[in-house]
Amino acid sequence: MADAGSQEIAVQISQFTTDAIGYSHPMTWVVGASSVTGHGLMASDVRITFGDGTELDLLRKSYRVGPYILAGFAGSVEIGLHLIGGLQEFLNVPDIPDNFAWQPDWVAQNWFPKAAKLFEAAPSAEQDCGSQILMVGVSPDENMGVPGFQRVYVTKLSWPDFTPQHMPKGLSVCHIGSGAGVEQYEAGIADFFKFGSSAMMAGMRGGPGGWAQMIGSSIGRIVSESPVPGISPHVFVDTVALGSFWSGTNDKNTYHPDGRKVEFRMPEVASTYADFVALCRKLGKAAGRAIA
């Protein structure tokens, strides 16, 4: 573990544009991160861009897909949610033991052909929106040289073939989505994964839930202090370790000197494509060609 503190954080930024479908650069982001202590993180905003260029906050983009793996998506909402559902189904094996955990690189290697076929079968208008999957999973078999500090895989899969791209072992932060270049968000998240940093040590003392809440609060502060057009201030934060998940948001209460209490709460969001279509119908929006 002596070299962990000097190990640089590897950051891979992925962007896609949508000029081919009549508007450009809808902003959104999903970030996955790994630490040397066996914890993984996924954070995502909830904004989507419709085919007419308008934007709304109404979609969850990160999910638990199996023990102990998180997955998020960017690009076509229709394709992305079907990919997430397909991955959950792929990992939903009957009668697996309670203490079972998937090996993340095996999952990526064996699932990506199915992802490519699903993408190929999607309507061409949805394919034009692009599609990316980001996975964060904890290995049951590999550690970082210290028992109990498991290796965390951060893996990106991009259209059209979805060949897995694994981020470097150890400290790693990877974004997907067109908001990936927002440096303040990247730096704020990365600080929690620098071995020995005050943020990381404070988070570890708080346990998985406290650590995730601190990250959510930090992201919320960055979003409010450095707002970017097209990126939602509402964020889901999910963490994973071997044997556990934790999920939360950056909801908060603000108390003013005059006694006023201002609540900041996650709006109603969809978590399945059926829910998304229903929300769109209620809002009078077309679900097709929506981009996350």
Image: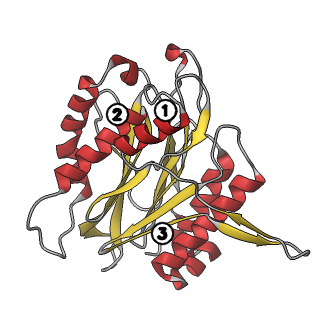
Direction right: furthest residue: 258
Q: Which amino acid lies under the numbered mark 1 shown in the image of this protein?
A: Ile
Q: Are marks 1 and 3 in contact (CB under 8 Å)?
A: no
Kindly identify which numbered label has been placed on residue 202.
Answer: none
User: From where the camera sits, is residue 64 visible?
Assistant: yes
Residue 163 position within the rendered picture, expressed as x and y whole percent measured from the top left:
28, 36
- Please give the name of the residue rendered at 65% of the width and 37% of the height, measured from the top-left corner: 230
| Residue closest to the eye, 123 or 114 | 123
Kindly identify which numbered label has been placed on residue 291.
Answer: 1
Q: Are marks 2 and 1 in contact (CB under 8 Å)?
A: no
Residue that label 2 marks: 79
Q: CA distance from mark 2 to mark 3?
A: 38 Å
- Please give the name of the residue rendered at 17% of the width and 70% of the height, measured from the top-left corner: 100
Q: Is residue 17 above or below residue 208?
A: above
Quarter occupied by the N terminus: bottom left
- Please give the name of the residue rendered at 66% of the width and 60% of the height, measured from the top-left corner: 220
Residue that label 3 marks: 4
| Residue closest to the eye, 116 or 13 | 116
Q: How is the image coloured?
A: secondary structure
Q: Residues within 10 Å of mark 1 (few under 14, many from 20)?
A: many
Q: Secondary structure at mark 2?
A: helix
Earlier residue among tags 1 and 3: 3
Q: Which amino acid lies under the numbered mark 2 shown in the image of this protein?
A: Ile
Left or right, 168 with respect to 242, comes to: right
Q: CA distance from mark 1 to mark 3?
A: 38 Å
Query: Comparing marks 2 and 3, which lies closer to the viewer?
Result: 2
- Please give the name of the residue rendered at 11% of the width and 68% of the height, measured from the top-left corner: 96
Q: Secondary structure at mark 3?
A: helix
Q: Which amino acid lies under the numbered mark 3 shown in the image of this protein?
A: Ala
Q: Secondary structure at mark 1?
A: loop
Earlier residue among tags 2 and 3: 3
